[in-house]
Amino acid sequence: MEIQLPQNDAAVLSDLFGSFNQVDTHYDDQFFYIESNGLPAHLMMIGITNWQQQVPIQQDYSGKNSWAIPLHPEIAEQPLSTKENFMKGAIAIAVNGIPIFNPLNNRGEDAKAIGELDQWGGHCGRADDYHYHLPPTHLQEIVGDNHPIAYALDGFPVYGETTEELDECLGRFTTRNTYQYHAVPEYPYLIAAMKGKVKLNPRTKAPENEISPQAKTTPIRKDLRPLPGAEIIDFKRISEHQFELTYRLSQQEHVIQYKLSDNGTYDFDFIHPDGSRETASYPIQ
């Protein structure tokens, strides 16, 4: 027998996501849409020891490229495991407007276990796009313990840790006949399988199949490769559009300063341990 679930309350979601200044929302009959610039209010990148040389820049998650949460979630007949699916794109959106990817990277590795993530459970992808790979439980300090920290792209909320028994998807039904996921401290961390129905991008195949609709990132430069031995030790937000990242390599400190200029380019200044510099500019596509 098909389980009848209540629909998501758009007014409640508006209040929840509205707790964060960098997030805008709207909705229609089918979806609740989340707009953001892809940058959280907290610092980023500190603590990464397996770094692909990407840095966080703004993304245009707005208009037709907003994140979309179904207002009418439905239980899937066969939930899709995140161990075998969704290694491309996001599986959820945090309430601060930051996407959450599969805890496994696109090579099937636990991103946390191999040192790819910062102190907040995030890092940057190939488009210099910041996203989480772990449940952002630190957001509970803002929204409170009884509120979701994210919504999965199947329409079900994600809460922090609980003492309640969870099913094979890392979720549970409530007494109000709603369904919610919960975070756990070890892999798979959140959403072991998608309890709800999702549409897949037909141009993708498992394990890199992607949930649709999905907001897209816009790269400004060629994606880079890991820098063996580098550890990110500091990150500063100098101003709204200016940042500084410091990493240690072979016991020497390197600094990358970058900013979004008025002419629509990202200007980078690479400062080497001996004080020499290299510069580069990348136009926004």
Image (tube, rainbow, N blue to C red):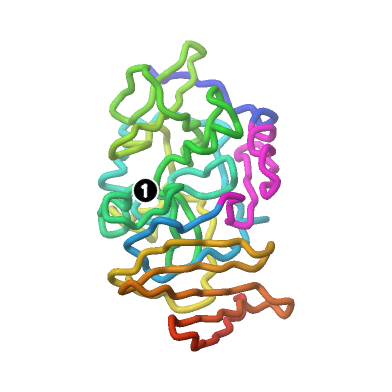
Front residue of this view, candidates 100 and 117: 117
When asked about the image quadrant of residue 146, the answer is top right
When asked about the image quadrant of residue 32, the answer is top right
Front residue of this view, candidates 70 and 281: 281
Does the segment drawn in magenta span residue 3? no
Q: Which residues are magenta?
A: 13-42
Q: Given the image, on which type of amino acid does mark 1 rest?
A: Asn
How many residues crowd mark 1 within 10 Å: few (<14), some (14–19), many (20+)? many
Q: Quadrant of the N terminus?
A: top left
The residue pinned by badge 1 equals: 102
When asked about the image quadrant of residue 142, the answer is top right
Residue at 68% across / 35% down in the picture? 14
Question: How far across and down, in percent of the image, does residue 170 sit?
Answer: 34, 29
Say how many tags the image has. 1
Q: Is residue 279 above or below residue 137?
A: below
Q: Residue furthest right?
A: 262
Side of 142 where 277 appears, left or right: left
**Element on which disc 1 rests:** loop
Question: How far across and down, in percent of the image, does residue 19 sit?
Answer: 67, 37
Question: How far across and down, in percent of the image, does residue 137 sit?
Answer: 47, 36
Q: Residue furthest top?
A: 175
Residue at 58% across / 84% down in the picture? 281
Residue at 59% across / 56% down in the picture? 39
Q: Quadrant of the C terminus?
A: bottom right
Q: Is residue 151 above or below residue 8?
A: below
Question: How far across and down, in percent of the image, does residue 99 sit?
Answer: 50, 49
Residue at 38% across / 54% down in the picture? 117
Does the segment drawn in magenta span residue 24? yes
